[in-house]
Amino acid sequence: MKILVASDGSRNALRAVRFAAKLDKSLTERGTITLISVHDDTALRYAQRFVGKPAVDDYLRELSDKDLAAARAILDKAGTRHDMIIRVGHVANEIAAAGKEGHFDLIVLGSKGRSALKDLVIGSVAMRVSSVATTPVVLVK
């Protein structure tokens, strides 16, 4: 089974990583878990004019490496094979697109745990991914 796990380094995201590792261990034929980190660069486009695109790209890469460090440590400790994808753009759309493009069987995301009313009014990345993805999505609370 190919599992895509989005991680921003938060506690909820790391719960999703642990869930994916346990799920993978329970399967008779273990697969590879792919961690994905996505950063929206919209706010940095103005700064890019002054510091250059390579500097912004390096900055976003450093953020993603930091975001994925704890998740990689969890998967290493669990003995789970894993790799990484780092993307830039609209977070929910990029996660959903990666799920489809990579032919993943499942996308696993941590949920922030906000109330249903707040999610209805302002939305969340997890809710947006679950609504636009063609790949099945599991939200871990």
Image: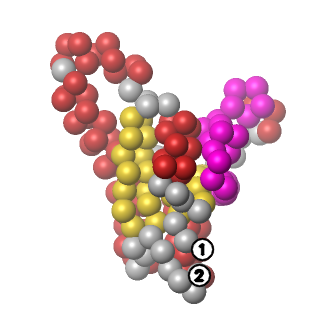
Tell me the amino acid under the disc marked 2.
Answer: Leu
Q: Residue at x 59, y 81 (%)?
A: 27
Viewer can see residue 42: yes
The one of 75 and 107 positioned closer to us in this rendering? 107
Confirm whether residue 126 shows in the render. Answer: no
Quarter of the image where one finds residue 55? top left
Residue 67: horizontal and vertical position, in percent? 39, 48
Residue name at image x 39 percent, y 35 percent: 88
Measured as percent of width and height from the top left, residue 61 is found at 28, 41
**Picture quarter with the N terminus:** bottom right
Q: Is residue 134 left or right of residue 86?
A: right
Q: Is residue 21 above or below residue 104?
A: below
Q: What's the residue at 73%, 34% (across, down)?
A: 119
Picture layout, residue 115 above or below residue 77: above
Q: Amino acid at mark 1?
A: Leu
Instruction: Inspect the magenta stretch and tell me whether residue 131 lies in it.
Output: yes
Gap in Å between the C-alphas at discs 1 and 2?
7 Å
Q: In the rendering, which numbered label is found on residue 23? A: 1
Residue 76 lies, in percent from the top left, at 37, 73
Q: Secondary structure at mark 2?
A: loop
Judging by the rendered image, the residue that carries numbered circle 2 is: 27
Q: Position of residue 93 (x, y in %)?
A: 54, 36
Q: Are marks 1 and 2 in contact (CB under 8 Å)?
A: yes
The question of residue 59 being in magenta is answered with: no
Q: How is the image coloured?
A: secondary structure
Q: Which mark is residue 91?
A: none
Q: Which residues are magenta?
A: 119-141
Q: Residues within 10 Å of mark 1 (few under 14, many from 20)?
A: few
Q: Quadrant of residue 32?
A: bottom left
Q: Name the quarter where the C terminus is drawn.
A: bottom right
